[in-house]
Image (cartoon, helix red, strand yellow):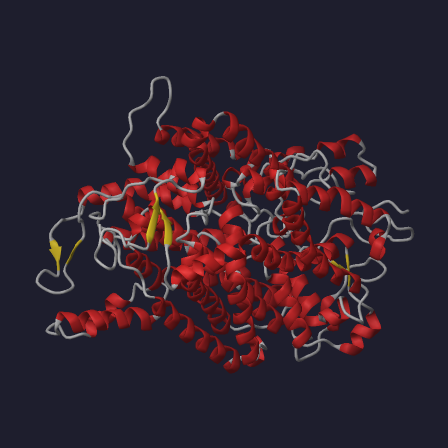
Amino acid sequence: MTTEHGSDKAPDMEVVEECTVKEVDLTVPKTDDPSLPVLTFRMWVLGLICCVILSFVNQFFWYRTNPLMISSVAAQIAVVPIGHLMARTLPTRQVFEGTRFAFSMNPGPFNIKEHVLITIFANAGAGTVYATHILSAVKLLYHRNLSLFPAFLVMITTQVLGFGWAGLFRKYLVEPGEMWWPSILIQVSLFRALHEKEKRPKGRTTRTQFFLIVMITSFAYYILPGYLFMMLSTFSWVCWLAPKSVLVQQLGSGHQALGVGAIGLDWATISSYLGSPLASPWFATLNIAIGFFLVMYVMTPICYWLNIYGAKTFPLFSNSLFRSDGSTYDISSIIDSKFHLDRAAYSRIGPVNMSTFFAFTYGLGFATLPATIVHVLLFHGRDLLTQAKRAFGGKKKIDIHTKLMKAYEKVPLWWFLVILVINIALIIFSCQYYNSALQLPWWGVLLACAIAMFFTLPIGIIQATTNQQPGLNIITEYVIGYLYPERPVANMCFKVYGYISMTQALTFLADFKLGHYMKIPPRAMFIAQVSYFFVLLNSLLPLSCQPEYCLILNHIYIWVVLQVVGTIVSVIVYTLTAWWLMGDIPNLCDTTKLPAGSQWTCPMDRVFFDASVIWGLVGPRRIFGVLGQYAGINWFFFDGAIAPFLVWLAQKVFPQQKWISLIHMPVILGSTAMMPPAAAVNFTSWIVIAFLSGFIVFRYRQKWWERYNYIFAGGLDAGTAFMTVLLFLGLQSRNISVNWWGNSGEGCPLASCPTAKGVVVDGCPVV
């Protein structure tokens, strides 16, 4: 093994053989086999198929009340037998033999590295394209026209933009051992279980056997909360103690209120918003639990029962928008023909009001951003400065995994810069050419990119160490809402370019870290993530060209094509799936017209729509500014900046108190960022499982944790995903259901009732 300079180890490099993070040391292999083929025919075929299937399924479930996201773990498992079958049956002879396109369809046994690239390919379809919210909001909730092509351009450019940010910050968020990305360890454990041969320990199971047991059990169990006994998803037993009491149901409802005692016996409920609890480090779990407790059981009850901002006029927990008398606000009545705010109508109807909980969640979002910046400067500033100095020379301290990756040629930074610059140019062109539809001016694009670039590093550090990601959605909405008010689509576009491009960058960086742990050649990673179509363009080159010129031209095609193949495929599938569902499902997302118990309520799209009204249509000046009643919420910006400083100061004053260093204010303040649409039951259930795994098992049964924890998480994900798809295709798509009290909801119908005197809501007692 040699470095880029040709020596075994550069004189300015200090290698740390042990990993700095114990969980990584226990999970990630410290060996490598550079001879394994990576960019194989099997990888391209299986990767594309997995990307298409996951994109379709995840967009399909996105509109449901419990928007289950099927992770790439399902694809990671499903392709193993197919890969081995292809290795046994495909011909081994060379295709296009005698030309520079020659390759073998079967270069040998199905190996772990091509399996990793298949999974990274599948990751493009494992989440969702956030920009589809724009399409859903405009067409389904604003009831306005938006053509397919400009919507597609927003989606594709949003996703590809993140690849540029990822390239800029990989040195800081991938190479250092301290940036360990906890959720990646689940996939690393699964890869090892599926490929490493091991003998069954006496009286115990191998990791593969354990995984299969968990997956089959999870698959069989999910038929209960997923179909036969849906009440298990939200078991709100406190509501049953007083069926006619609004107060008791406000306390007990896990979906619509505080969720005291509520528990979800359903893996989809547990992992749907916060990710797998088995991947959360204990200190991060503790901070989330503290933040959730303070918000739900201290701040919310105090604000509600003190009637702050007229809290009792509205539901305790709601993301809907209301008039001052507690009735639902008719948003269409304040929109003019140009899709701007009708100021006269707004003055006549009155201001938009929120539930106090919803207003304070925005305040916590205000606090999280300055807390993130101050926390990173205080607690990671010196490390970042050191890493920056190492980038330009000086002594480098690397762990064993970075040492092993030195055997491979790096991807030059300017490859990413070319992608970034051309993509930004395409975004500006799209917004200018389709300005009547997208509303965002060119300067808004550049400002959104600046915000995304600035926050990728600090938020990436937090995600890479805590598995939690503070969001930029509120600050992006706030900025463009003040600078360019009364234009809801411009606000939505600015948010996806300023916020989601950063989120997509962190997804790419997580993939880079997975490749780093599994020792995937960086240039193979780049090609798999960036360009599949360069193979087609290579046919334009004359077969007689000199090898050195062919290599240069090949690289140019890779860079200039700018098509992130997984991203392109997934965006196409996401867009077409959303378009199909909008036309095929009557009253999709319209809760006023959907039948009772319908799953097509679109909770994420409703929140996105309401935010576009608050920040885009009405504008922050009329909500949180001098013309609004929620101006006091702006003090959260100051509070968020001060909070990490107080922790840092306490740590300096009391250095012997080690527990102070575990207080992570960005995570505490941002712990409830997903509420709504996430509900109390999602948090209470998640915290219980995360505590059992990250504290009890890790501390007292560490050998079991090392061997089985992440395998257990992968088995639960896979079993739940497979049964969910099977239930829908076999039963729910044909409207075959089981009607009994166990499928009639959580049993807390009064939890959303207001308690102010004189406010009348159907189905609620009159106070």
The correct choice, above or below, for 205 with respect to 650 in the image is above
| Side of 540 relative to 388 (left or right) | left
Residue at figure coordinates x 56%, y 79% from the top left = 443
Front residue (pair 75, 224): 75
| Side of 645 relative to 212 (left or right) | right
Front residue (pair 12, 289): 12
The correct choice, above or below, for 607 with respect to 706 in the image is below
Q: Quadrant of residue 692?
A: top right
Residue at figure coordinates x 31%, y 46% from the top left = 115
**Residue 162 position within the rendered picture, expressed as x and y whole percent measured from the top left:** 46, 64
Residue 597 visible (yes or no): no
Q: How many callouts does the rendering have?
A: 0
**Residue 454 position within the rendered picture, expressed as x and y whole percent measured from the top left:** 53, 66
**Residue 5 position within the rendered picture, expressed as x and y whole percent measured from the top left:** 24, 59
**Residue 245 position within the rendered picture, expressed as x and y whole percent measured from the top left:** 83, 37
| Side of 512 relative to 383 (left or right) | left
| Side of 196 relative to 431 (left or right) | left
Residue at figure coordinates x 91%, y 53% from the top left = 758
Front residue (pair 278, 257): 278
Q: Quadrant of residue 232?
A: top right
Q: Residue furthest left?
A: 98
Residue at figure coordinates x 38%, y 46% from the top left = 75
